[in-house]
Amino acid sequence: MRKQLPNPYIPMLTEVVSITSENKVNDIKTIELKFKKEEDYKNFAYIPGQFAEISLIGKGECPIGIASSPTEEGTIKFTIKKMGTVTSGFHNCEVGDTVGIRGPCGNGWPMEDMKGKNIVVIGGGFAFSTLRSLVLYVLDEKYRKDYKDITVIYGNRDSGEVLYQDVLEEWDKRDDINVVLTIDREEEGWTRKVGFVAAIVKEVAPSPENAVAIICGPPIMIRTAVAELVELGWKDEQILNSLEMRMKCGIGKCGRCNIGNKFVCVDGPVFSLAELKKMPNEY
Ligand SMILES: Cc1cc2nc3c(=O)[nH]c(=O)nc-3n(C[C@H](O)[C@H](O)[C@H](O)COP(=O)(O)OP(=O)(O)OC[C@H]3O[C@@H](n4cnc5c(N)ncnc54)[C@H](O)[C@@H]3O)c2cc1C
Ligand code: FES
């Protein structure tokens, strides 16, 4: 008998198993979800860089990048900044609450194409979630041999905004990853770099040789960091970015997220700079 595919419009049900506040001002939280049905968890096979449409009854639904790595088995994680109706709903969640989830959606980071390459991850602010997923994935013992040198440059306004302190500490202990943390201004007790991300990219000067750069963050950070990479000889094809457009269906049906003939929810959200340059400047 033919296998019945899950209906992409019907959310699968999960339960909140933990909630972690990620920053000092407490407007960014990571929620950890466990699927109520084992079968749904198996169907939710994802790669780093994909997102999901997550929902709360009575509040609505919104697209959120998957912060966990497929290598962290059993649950999935989302890091959510409080913005409006739906995201505030998630901030008021408690352990045991029910959350709907549709997905995984989008293309994700090109994990296959990146095999055998040096990876330079450049992140700014709270847009580090799918980068967390990617770095945990490539560091996992099952996949580490598939990728070469890993450099992470991660910047924030101040030390209170640095996400995922627990995993950053673990990465610091390893000698097969170079983690460069920076904040915008000097701060008492801060022993890492000080300066904007673009300036740190210039200082670290990652080589474009057999490498790919993955960039997520505020538009100004992306523009300035990309300019430094181009100065260092990086080509548009080597620079990847994830777009955050307004979305509804997440599955290429409603036309809410189009840029030219591309559906960001299906063809993206990950695009190379070379691809973005061919698209109308509507993002
Ligand atoms: C592919 C993708 C991945 C995303 N990943 C994350 C993530 O990992 N963590 C996270 O916190 N958010 C993420 N977002 C943004 C998130 O979807 C929006 O913040 C959310 O939809 C806002 O819903 P709301 O009901 O709380 O806000 P609303 O009540 O709809 O709006 C409140 C405010 O948020 C702004 N806003 C609404 N939607 C967006 C949007 N898509 N982008 C920017 N601003 C918006 C509005 O202009 C308004 O000022 C992602 C979006 C996309 C498309
Ligand atoms: S969100 Fe509906 S087509 Fe992309």
Image (cartoon, rainbow, N blue to C red):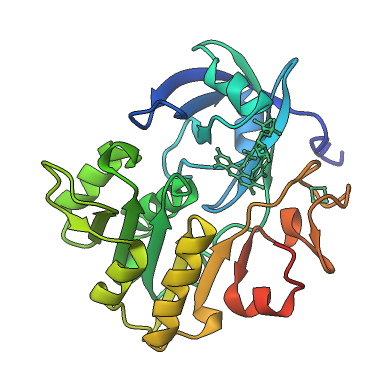
Q: Residue 217 or 39: which is nearer the viewer?
A: 217
| Furthest-bottom residue in this view | 233
Residue located 62% across and 19% down the image: 89
How many tags in the picture? 0
267 left or right of 169?
right
Task: Name the quadrant of the N terminus.
Answer: top right
The structure residue drawn at horizontal position 31% and vertical position 77%, both measured from the top left corner, is: 206
Quarter of the figure with the C terminus? bottom right
Classify 174 as above or below 211: above
Q: Quadrant of residue 104?
A: top right
Residue 17 position, x and y percent, is 47, 18
Q: Quadrant of residue 52?
A: top right
| Residue 150: percent from left, percent from top | 31, 66
In the image, ligand 1 is in what quadrant? top right
Q: Is residue 82 above or below residue 202?
A: above
- Nearer the observer, 111 or 276: 276
